[in-house]
Image: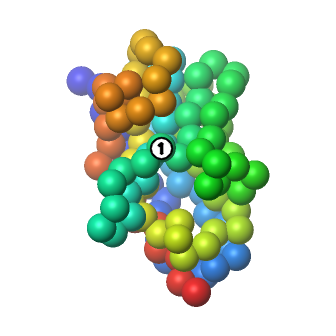
Amino acid sequence: QEQLVESGGGLVQAGDSLRISCAASGVTFSRYAWFRQAPGKTREFVGGISGGSTYYADSVKGRFTISRDDANNGVYLQMNSLQPEDTAVYYCAASFYGNRWSEAGMRYWGKGTLVTVSS
């Protein structure tokens, strides 16, 4: 059964960096994405990776970097210059097929890891 498990969330200060990870259980997906859901808001796309190509939401472009390690079935989100508005539960998502970076376009989901950025 395919599973995604996020880790690495925590409490940081504004301007800090943090890297969160997602481990896929024994399977290599073709597409991974990170989404986030802030308190009181709907879940939104943060970034995605398919093959060697990466895609980012405008709000994180230039600050966040997504990468993957297929040998270890992992995907990572390096977050720099964090701001209080980045506070959210971050979800890893994956799929084998498709080309949409939307919730509907991703089939498998982790349970999320909380990132809190204090001012």
Q: Is residue 24 above or below residue 115?
A: above
Residue corresponding to mark 1: 45
Image position of 38 (left or right of 70)? left
Q: Nearer the viewer, residue 115 or 24?
A: 115
Q: Nearer the viewer, residue 40 or 11?
A: 40
Q: Residue 53 placed where, x, y %?
A: 68, 25
Q: Nearer the viewer, residue 71 or 88?
A: 88
As drawn, the residue found furthest toward the top would be 97
Name the image quarter holding residue 69.
top right
Q: Is residue 61 above or below residue 15?
A: above
Q: Residues within 10 Å of mark 1 (few under 14, many from 20)?
A: many
Q: Residue 54 placed where, x, y %?
A: 66, 31
Q: Is residue 63 visible?
A: yes
Here the colouring is rainbow
As drawn, the residue found furthest toward the bottom would be 119
Q: Is residue 28 visible?
A: no
Name the image quarter holding residue 3.
top left
SS at mark 1 in the image: strand
Q: Is residue 90 above or below residue 17?
A: above
As drawn, the residue found furthest toward the left would be 1
Name the image quarter holding residue 93.
top left
Q: Residue 66 placed where, x, y %?
A: 63, 41
Quadrant of the image containing the C terminus:
bottom right
Residue at the image position 36 percent from the left and 51 percent from the top: 43
Q: Residue 106 placed where, x, y %?
A: 37, 28
Quadrant of the image containing the N terminus:
top left
As drawn, the residue found furthest toward the right would be 62
